[in-house]
Image (cartoon, helix red, strand yellow):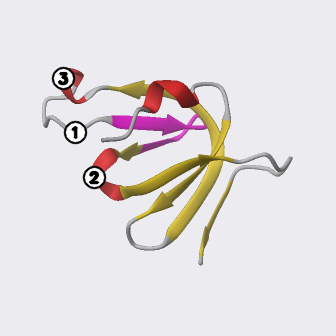
Amino acid sequence: MLTFGQYMDKRIRVIFRDGGIYEGIAKDFSSALDNPDGVATICVGDTYEFREDEIANIELAYADVPETAHAV
């Protein structure tokens, strides 16, 4: 279980189970209890919301780069 609250307003790198990576600022999150389907989510930037079951790991990203999505 990931703890999304610790990442709020920080630049993060989301590493997905399929190997994809997305970097951006964590803006919001919802716990599993707050979502009808019982899966926690995290919002990155103003556009993207990712489900906990899609995410392998989250780490702090320190580089000053724009929000990006890329595959490894």
Report the side of 23 relative to 50 (left or right): right
- Near mark 2 (Cα within 10 A), the count class, few <14, some 14-19 or many ≥20, is few
Element assignment for label 2: helix
Residue highlighted by disc 1: 39
Q: Amino acid at mark 1?
A: Val
Q: Residue furthest left?
A: 37
In this view, the residue in front, 1 or 30, is 1
**Residue beneath label 3, please?**
33
Q: Alpha-carbon distance for marks 2 and 1?
A: 7 Å
Instruction: Determine if the magenta segment contains residue 47.
Output: yes
Residue at the location (65% across, 52% down)? 23
Nearer to the camera, 50 or 1: 1
Q: State the residue position of label 2.
A: 53
Q: What x and y, as percent, mark residue 59? A: 59, 48
* Circles 2 and 1: CB atoms closer than 8 Å: yes
Residue 61, horizontal then vertical, whole percent: 71, 48
Image x and y of residue 46, in percent: 58, 34
**Corner quadrant of residue 1:** top left
